[in-house]
Every structure is written in C-alpha cells, then in structure tokens.
C-alpha cells in the first residue's frame, strides 16, 4: 500500500524545498549508491564460495564438454548412442553442477526434443 500511495520524486523534492533548509533535497541517489555490473559480478563471485560467472557458454563449448568429459561415463562415442534416460541425467548434471540453465541449448547439444511444455 505504501508503494501505491507514496509521492512522486518531483512532489518530494518540492516539499523538501519548502523547508527553508540550506542543504539540498534528499534523494535516493544520495542515500543508496548504485552498483556497476563489475561490482555485481565481483559480489556474486564470492557468493557461497561458488564459481559464479554470468558468461553463458556457447553451444560449441557445451557440446565439447559433453563429448570430452561426460560421454565416457556411458561408454559411448556419440550423444546419438545415449538413451533418453542418459541424456536427461547429463542435462541434469550440467544444469545443477555447472549452472547451465539454458534448456534449449542443452536440448540442442544432447539431440533432444524441446517443446517448452507444449
């Protein structure tokens, strides 16, 4: 309710100007500084001692990772030789362990149909 009833910035500045105080009006920028993307990246990098990165891996990087590091666990040479269950297991591992959240990209690299719930 407060957010719906609060004054606009212009009204707030006008009201403060009527107070006959020598100091400039208080604004949000004076109270809270904004953060650059570099600051946010730096803070998130230390979040929970994780290896956070906001850089999205390319399809080639994800497919190469699957081919070089994950296929050997299933004793196959290609994603085309994996069962549907094995593909889902690899997708889950990439999603949870490496934070690859682009489901369309995972579906492309694992040769899976992706219909987005349709």
Image (spheres, grey):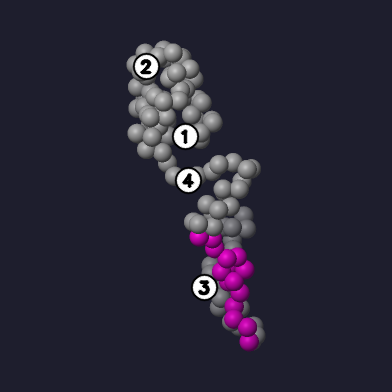
Query: Sequence order check: which comes first, mark 4 or mark 2?
Result: 4
Cα distance in 3D space between marks 1 and 4: 10 Å
- The residue nearer to you, when weighing 94 against 9, is 94
Instruction: Give the residue number, with chain letter if any, for mark 3.
Output: 10
Task: Tell me the SS state at disc 2.
Answer: loop
Q: Are the residues at dot 1 and dot 4 in contact (C-beta closer than 8 Å)?
A: no
The residue identified by callout 2 is 77
Q: Which mark is residue 54?
A: 4
Q: Are marks 3 and 2 in contact (CB under 8 Å)?
A: no
Q: Disc 1 marks which residue?
A: 100
Q: Identify the residue at horizontal 55%, vertical 53% (top origin).
A: 42
Could one spot residue 116 in this view of the protein? no
Check whether the beta carbons of the residues at disc 3 and disc 4 lie within 8 A of each other: no
Q: Going from the N terminus, do you reach mark 2 or mark 1 first?
A: 2
Find out whether residue 50 is within the magenta segment.
no
**Residue 28 lies in magenta, yes or no?**
yes
Mark 3 vs mark 2: in front: 2
Q: Earlier in the sequence, mark 1 or mark 4?
A: 4
Question: Which residues lie in the magenta part?
Answer: 22-36
């Amino acid at each position: 309710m407060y957010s719906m009833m609060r004054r606009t910035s212009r009204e707030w500045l006008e009201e403060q100007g009527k107070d006959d105080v020598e100091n400039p009006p208080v604004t949000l920028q004076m109270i809270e500084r904004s953060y650059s993307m570099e600051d946010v990246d730096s803070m998130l990098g230390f979040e929970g001692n994780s290896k956070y990165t906001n850089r999205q891996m390319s399809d080639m990087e994800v497919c190469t990772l699957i081919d070089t590091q994950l296929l050997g666990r299933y004793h196959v040479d290609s994603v085309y030789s994996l069962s549907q269950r094995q593909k889902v297991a690899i997708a889950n591992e990439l999603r949870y362990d490496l934070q690859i959240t682009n489901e369309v990209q995972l579906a492309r690299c694992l040769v899976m149909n992706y219909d987005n719930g349709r």
